[in-house]
Image (cartoon, helix red, strand yellow):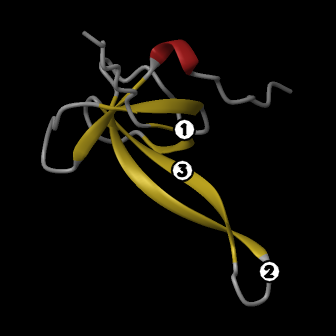
Amino acid sequence: MEQKISLKQTFTGVVVKTAMKDTATVRVDRYVKNAKYKKYFVRSQKYLAHDHGNTVKVGDTVTIVATRPISKLKRFAIDPAKTVPAESDTN
């Protein structure tokens, strides 16, 4: 018998909002090439991701992983092992 391994969908993005309880809004950017003019431009989409304990801050770079539906719009969870804190200005 063969073992079937399914990889979960993952995205890397930046946290833009943490106002909700146990939830962060993550903006994921991707580069798209225009077929006619061959110009690259940025398209972005925002996802709601589960953040247990509100551990991330605005500006952090995080990786979100697909999970079971947690609420009406939350289908992703933040991977705490792959979180990069934002650089803060300490002058």
**Identity of the amino acid at label 2?**
Lys
- In front here: 23 or 74? 74
For the residues labelled 2 and 3, say whether their Cβ atoms are less than 8 Å apart: no
**Residue 79 appears in which quarter of the rendering?**
top left
Q: Nearer the viewer, residue 31 or 26?
A: 31
71 left or right, relative to 91? left
Mark 2 element type: loop
Nearer-the-camera pick, 67 or 26: 67
Image quarter in which the N terminus is found: top left
- Quarter of the view holding residue 4: top left
10 Å neighbourhood of mark 2: few (<14), some, or many (≥20)? few
- Looking at the image, the residue that sits furthest to the right is 91
For the residues labelled 1 and 2, the Cα–Cα distance comes to 34 Å
Up the image or down, 50 lies above or below 75; here it is above
- Residue count near mark 3 (Cα–Cα under 10 Å), binned few <14, some 14–19, many ≥20: some
Name the residue type under label 1.
Val
Nearer to the camera, 89 or 47? 47
In front of the other: label 1 or label 2? 2
Q: Circle 3 sits on which residue? A: 28
Image coords of residue 15 (percent x, y): 52, 41
